[in-house]
Image: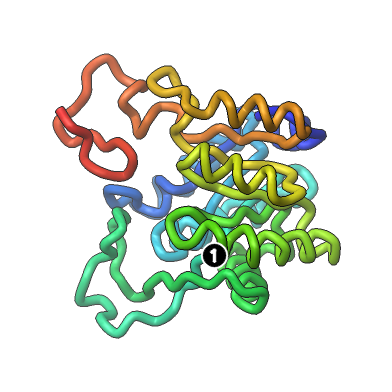
Amino acid sequence: MSGTSWDGALGKLGFGAAGIGNLYRAMPDAQAAATVKAAWDSGVRYFDTAPHYGLGLSERRLGAVLREMPRSEFTVSTKVGRLLVPNAVGFSAKDDEGFDVAATSKRQWDFSEAGIRRSIEESLERLGLDHVDIAYLHDPDVHNLAKGIGEALPVLEKLRADGVVKAIGVGTNSAEAALECVEAADLDLVMLAGRYTLLEQPGVPFLDRCVARGTGVVNVGVFNSGLLARPDVPEDSHYNYARAPR
């Protein structure tokens, strides 16, 4: 993490909560809670989540632990751009975007001001907190990058000015999309997933530009879905949210 005064607030390491949203495999509630507590006990004070992660499960599980901690001692971020709406299939199907949860809800893209405000309000309800510190626009390149830049980022700038959130940014797996957003808006932070690791460095030009603009970078997915975290690669390994090629 680098670039702005957020360095001190976020620390050198943060906790990414996709895993406790049952990414790729189910995790018992008790194990999820113990994982968050272990991060806290190790000194982590920055926690990131999103409605997308487990159709809200990640936010609920993270909030259940953080609500017991002094609010002034941690920073939490969530994401906007996808709303969760009722799914007619209910418990009869599993989520089809990599999370081992029942498809009781489905994701609906919404970059409007009303949608973004609703997304934050619903995230606060799931987290059980009175505010989040950082709001990222989630995967604008997956939906509509031009609309994200022209419609959603100005809304986030407005919410920051209104004091709804302290900082705003973009979360994406594309260094190219992240760079376009940095050039187009006054962002505090950018969350770049998987594009600056020991395996890949296409994000270097983007990082250089962020340094020049004073935009902070939260570098995530640094083990490329675990490929860099073990000496041998298991048969069921993932890369870029899909099964890794042999």
Work out which residue is located at the far top of the displayed protein and give it: 231
Residue 125 seen from this side: no
Residue drawn at the location 74% of the way across and 29% of the way down: 3
Q: State the image coordinates of residue 13 (x, y, percent, origin top left).
A: 60, 29
Residue 33 position, x and y percent, is 48, 48
| Residue reaching furthest to the bottom | 88
In this rendered view, identify the residue nearer to me: 151 or 218.
151
What residue is shown with label 1? 81
In-image side of 188 versus 217 (left or right): right
Quadrant including the N terminus: top right
Q: Residue at x 61, y 35 (%)?
A: 218
Residue 207: x, y in percent? 62, 28
Q: Determine whether the residue tagged by mark 1 lies in a helix, strand or loop.
A: loop
Q: Nearer the viewer, residue 64 or 242?
A: 242
Residue 60, position as x, y percentages in the image: 51, 62
The relative height of residue 95 versus residue 69 in the rendered view (above or below) is below
* Residue shown at 54% from the left, 38% from the top: 192
Q: Is residue 10 above or below residue 57?
A: above
If the image is split into quadrants, where does the C terminus sit? top left
What residue is at 32 percent from the left and 44 percent from the top?
241
Q: Is residue 32 left or right of residue 185?
A: left
Q: Is residue 72 visible?
A: yes
Label 1 amino acid? Gly
Label 1 CA crowd tier, 10 Å (few <14, some 14–19, many 20+): many
